[in-house]
């Protein structure tokens, strides 16, 4: 709701966007990531995440103390969050490919219920579409609306 307020300040009031965000907050968020739902009722196990992990913030480089260039990530927006939160911005901007996700999930399995994993990642991607819309306007709204329509159709009743 904070991002909606920022969006309205930047882009002006938008009743369609407001309605979709309210439905998503009221129905979808508790259904997909509510504490009584995830991990058999144990809720989210928070971890430190990069917070802005996408291909534009990754490269090969040599930091002090390194003998040779290695894969590095930078421009962190670190926060304490659900591990799957990290995957939302990766999905929005193309990610790192299937081999990355395969290795990622070998180290950190999908949160239960695993069959809702794709929808949780979409919900976390939605955050970034809304945030970018609030900051930059433009086409980010259509991506946000599409994600919300899909999630509301699945979890909104």
Image: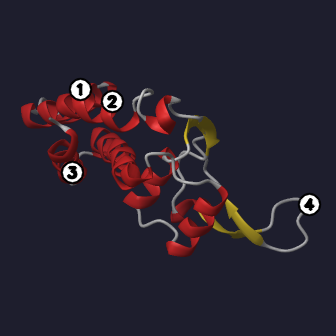
**The C terminus - image quarter:** top left
Q: Nearer the observer, disc 2 or disc 3?
A: 2
Q: CA distance from mark 3 to mark 1?
A: 26 Å
What is the C-alpha distance between the residues marked 1 and 2? Answer: 7 Å
**Is the residue marked by circle 1 packed among few (<14), some (14-19), or many (20+) residues within 10 Å?**
few
Front in this rendered view, residue 93 or 154: 154
Left or right? Give the position of 91 relative to 7.
right
Counting from the top left corner in percent of width and height, residue 13 is at 12, 29
Identify the residue shown where x is 29% and y is 38%: 134
| Circle 4 Cα neighbour tier, 10 Å, few/some/many (<14 / 14–19 / ≥20) | few
**Mark in the foreground, 3 or 1:** 1
Dot in front, 1 or 4: 1
Instruction: Please tell me the numbered disc located at residue 146.
Output: none
Q: Are marks 1 and 2 in contact (CB under 8 Å)?
A: yes
The residue labelled by disc 1 is 26
- Is 67 placed above or below 76 here? below
Please name the residue that numbered disc 3 is placed on.
138
Q: Position of residue 86 (x, y in %)?
A: 51, 49
- Which residue, given by chain and number where applicable, does mark 4 sit on? 65
Identify the secondary structure beneath mark 4.
loop
Measured in 3D between alpha carbons, the distance from the residue under mark 2 to the one under mark 3, in whole angstroms, is 29 Å
- Work out whether residue 2 or residue 31 is closer to the camera in this orientation and state it: 31
Which residue is the site of mark 2? 30
Q: Are marks 2 and 4 in contact (CB under 8 Å)?
A: no
First in sequence: mark 1 vs mark 4: 1
Left or right of 148 in this view: 91: right
Mark 2 or mark 4, earlier in chain: 2
Q: Going 35% across and 41% down the picture, which residue do you hit? A: 127
- Quarter assignment of residue 65: bottom right
């Amino acid at each position: 709701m904070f991002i909606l307020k920022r969006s309205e300040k930047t882009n002006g009031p938008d009743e369609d966007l407001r309605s979709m965000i309210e439905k998503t907050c009221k129905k979808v968020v508790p259904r997909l990531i509510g504490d009584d739902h995830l991990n058999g009722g144990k809720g989210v196990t928070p971890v430190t995440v990069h917070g802005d992990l996408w291909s534009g913030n990754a490269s090969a480089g040599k930091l002090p103390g390194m003998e040779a260039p290695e894969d590095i990530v930078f421009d962190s927006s670190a926060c304490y969050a659900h591990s799957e939160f990290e995957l939302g911005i990766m999905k929005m901007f193309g990610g790192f490919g299937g081999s990355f996700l395969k290795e990622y999930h070998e180290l950190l399995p999908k949160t239960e219920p695993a069959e809702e994993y794709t929808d949780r990642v979409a919900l976390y991607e939605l955050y970034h579409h809304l945030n970018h819309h609030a900051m930059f306007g433009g086409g980010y709204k259509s991506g946000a609306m599409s994600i919300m329509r899909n999630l509301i159709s699945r979890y909104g009743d």
